[in-house]
Amino acid sequence: MPRINSPAELEEFRKDIISKRDPNKPCIAICTGTGCLALGAANVVTALKEEIKKQGLETKVDVETKVDVRETGCPGFCERGPLLVIYPEEICYLQVEPGDAEEIISETIVAKKVIDRLLYAAPGTDNDEKIVRESEIPFYKHQMRNLIGNNIKIDPKNIDDYLAVGGYSALVKALCQETPEQVVEMVKNSGLRGRGGAGFSAGMKWEFARKSPEKTKYVIVNADEGDPGAFMDRALLEGNPHSVLEGLTIGAFAIGSHEGYIYVRQEYPLAVENVGIAIEQAEAQGFLGKNILGSGFDFTIEVHQGAGAFVCGEETALLMSLEGKPGEPRPRPPYPAVKGLWGKPTNINNVETWANVPLIINNGADFLSSIGTESSKGTKIFSLVGKVNNTGLVEVPMGITLRDIIYEVGGGVPGGKKFKAVQTGGPSGGCIPEEHLDIGVDFDQLAKVGAIMGSGGMIVMDEDTCMVDVAKYFLKFLAGESCGKCSPCREGIRQMHKILNNVSEGKGREGDIELLEELCEATRNASLCALGGTAPNPVLNTIRYFRDEYEAHIKEKRCPAYVCKELIAYYIDPDKCTACMICSRKCPAEAIVGAKKQIHVIDQEKCTNCGTCFEVCPSRFSAVTRLSGEPVPPPIPEEERTIVRKSEKK
């Protein structure tokens, strides 16, 4: 692997790479991100390679038959993995299994035929309505994939793939054609705001650190992504680590730093592996280290693995952890840009923010500022999960409506269920009801309806979701993740969770809602860091939009969504029971009595309200009924439980 010492050498090397890649040559790009690997993508890769070898295609010189298998990062459509795209035709196959390998090679690669059963078909549509090309699938068609679009084209363990799509050209431009001040100004003018949650201007952050007279400065990638259901940063680090390294190096040049860190949680082993390989390759080829590309600029990067504490996503707690101390936040000011790692000026941005930098340098500030809204520029990656047909990573322009994300990209709510709310911003975010689905998604619009952008988590909920239970879930998570340093956060979250727990168990009292609101305000105003400051959001937000559900739990001892176990009872309707005995066999508590030709009865004292009987009762009978806030009818006398079938009535 040759070291590149100048921009001219880089361009010659890039041309050499591209010249050896015939665009007409078949290439099977298969996702080997964490999600697809969990679904068996590694076995599919093995099967494809074995089939290519079996058919003798790896030794063919004919461009039409020789084929490559490229193991790539996550393209986002996690709902349908393992997935692959066959170039140059851009044929997209979904939910591929090892047993499909022989047919893919024989039919698609050799015979140039499309396999219909592996193509995309929208849920609820005629199976004949199949879509062949990846870009035409609705999930992708309605996105703007500036950052993750290259994931399916790049082997993250091969720097040549990144160079082939123009990688490190932004670094050349920054080091050799711009001054540090011009780079900072370009980022400021682009309107790029931090994608980690707070949404502070990235350019202003850089400027604060640049103006410091200190000689030693640091730049840090915050990859401590801890929101439940969020995996945007992981997918970028796994799938295109060089884009993050390039952005970080440009940022270091802009503020005058020569040492950088990538703080990534240990739960991301593949991201750690891929970014480690990328650093080694970048150092070997002269994109990191001494005298980068002959510019005289020196910069090194080190990977630090965090232990998984959610609070370390807060930048001052991250700095404490990086210094080898307990990951606890400290008061601000001074801000890290003035006094950060080991007391030196430090610039911290998350993975997605750094990955945007090469796009800005390559295309100019107007490229980013022309996308989005007046106050929120560019695209944003969301992890779209929950009760939605198409789950996965989506990258959309700022300002797109929630309705378009959920229904156009996400394909709507499955099973004909009614949409109830969408939760944005992770555990500290808010739940947005249907009445606000048409707001534009940006930092300011979400704040107006009591939610936050956060790092990009987006959880869709349907009519079967209990909003009291949702608030309780997030408070339980935050109570466990609070570092405990300040009592408003430590005790405030704990007390709020205790009240919510009582409400969900039917022990709620008049005044609990008002007490929750009072605790929320105290916790929000007095907590040391953003974890405590935003922890009340899910409580205040659900009370704001779903107060009737809280009142039903407290006043009527009823859970409208039939989620809170202590407020639910199950009853077998004697007029519908056919004595099929399925419920009695499946009941884990052995709470159902009855035999053949005998109406079944649930012993309410033994019943644990698990709902198994309700789930297994054949839909054509629907004999098991859920009750919430209603008295359970008394069981019919034993002598009246015998079922006389129609055929026996003679």
Image (cartoon, helix red, strand yellow):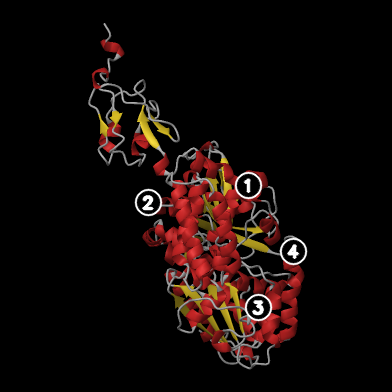
Label 2 is placed on what type of residue? Gly
Could you tell me which residue is drawn at 36 percent across and 22 percent down? 576
Could you tell me which residue is drawn at 58 percent across and 45 percent down? 546
Where disc 1 sits, the SS reads helix
Look at the picture and state if 355 lies above or below 392: below
What residue is pinned by disc 3? 169
What residue is pinned by disc 1? 408
Earlier in the chain: of badge 3 and badge 4, it is: 3
Where disc 2 sits, the SS reads helix
> For this view, does 305 lie left or right of residue 131?
left
Residue 227's label in the rendered image is none
Earlier in the chain: of badge 2 and badge 1, it is: 2
Which image quadrant: the C terminus? top left
Label 3 is placed on what type of residue? Ser
Cα distance in 3D space between marks 1 and 3 = 35 Å
- Circle 1 or circle 4, nearest the eye: 4
Could you tell me which residue is drawn at 47 percent across and 56 percent down? 497
Residue 375's label in the rendered image is 4
In-front residue for pair 332/7: 332
List x then y, in percent, for residue 229. Answer: 49, 58
Cα distance in 3D space between marks 4 and 2 = 50 Å
Residue 99's label in the rendered image is 2
Earlier in the chain: of badge 4 and badge 2, it is: 2
Could you tell me which residue is drawn at 39 percent across and 43 percent down? 566
Label 3, residues with CA under 10 Å away: few <14, some 14-19, many ≥20: some
- Circle 1 or circle 3, nearest the eye: 1
Earlier in the chain: of badge 1 and badge 4, it is: 4
Label 1, residues with CA under 10 Å away: few <14, some 14-19, many ≥20: some
Label 1 is placed on what type of residue? Glu
Cα distance in 3D space between marks 1 and 4 = 24 Å
CB atoms of marks 1 and 4 within 8 Å: no
